[in-house]
Each structure stands twice: as C-alpha cells, then as structure tokens.
Amino acid sequence: STGWPKPKRSSRAPARRANVSLRHITSLYYGHAKDPKYSVASSVLSAAEQARIEATRKEAAVLASRFAVTAEGLNAKDPDFFSAEINSLEYAADLLRQMART
C-alpha cells in the first residue's frame, strides 16, 4: 500500500474529466499537496465547473418536461379557464429548454 487513503468513487469521474491522476486528486482533496501546479488545479476546477453546468442543463430539461406536462393537463381540463396558467407554463418550459441546450 502507498499509505494514501482509498479515494471515493465520486472522485474518479472528475479525475478522468480533468485528465489528472486519481492520486493527485486524492492528494488535493485531503490537503497533502500544499502547492499544486496551476495547470492541474485549473483542470480540476474546469472539470468541476463543467460537471455543474451539465447537471444544471439536465435539471432544466426535467423541469421543462414537468411544466409542459402540467400545461397539457390544464389544457385538457379547461383551456379557457386555465389559459393564463397554460401560457405561463409553456413559456417557462420554452425558456428552460433553451437553457438546457446552451
């Protein structure tokens, strides 16, 4: 054994995304690396930011789908009575779909 703590599974994907060794990620995580190289730190931060962006896009797509289904349900129930809500939900769903694509 190298004496290093066993890394968590959750740290493997960011290591692969950042193209950095898992050992270096573990060292950064546990504070063993006092002065990490700028390029390595930059890669890790960039990969983490990209992961957050991807998660946000997925969440926006899920919410857009929920809003669209809700609008369809209200439209089936009483389109005249719920017209304002339907329009608002459809508009919000369109905005969320745009966010999910960019």
Image (cartoon, rainbow, N blue to C red):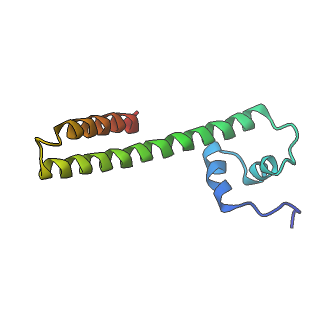
6 or 68: nearer the eye? 68
Where residue 5 appears, as percent x and y from the top left, is: 82, 62
Query: Does residue 6 lie above or below 27 as drawn?
Result: below
19 or 12: nearer the eye? 12
89 or 50: nearer the eye? 89
Quadrant the C terminus occupies = top left
Query: Does residue 48 lie above or below 77 as drawn?
Result: above
28 or 95: nearer the eye? 95
Residue at the (87%, 62%) spot, across then down: 2
Q: How many marks?
A: 0
- Residue 65 located left or right of residue 55: left
Residue at the (55%, 42%) spot, across then down: 52
Residue at the (59%, 38%) spot, across then down: 49
Most extreme residue toward the bottom, as rendered? 1
Where residue 74 appears, as percent x and y from the top left, is: 19, 49
- Residue 76 located left or right of residue 19: left
Most extreme residue toward the front, as rendered? 81
Where residue 26 appears, as percent x and y from the top left, is: 77, 53
Residue at the (22%, 46%) spot, across then down: 71
- Residue 77 located left or right of residue 91: left
- Residue 83 located left or right of residue 100: left
Quadrant the N terminus occupies = bottom right
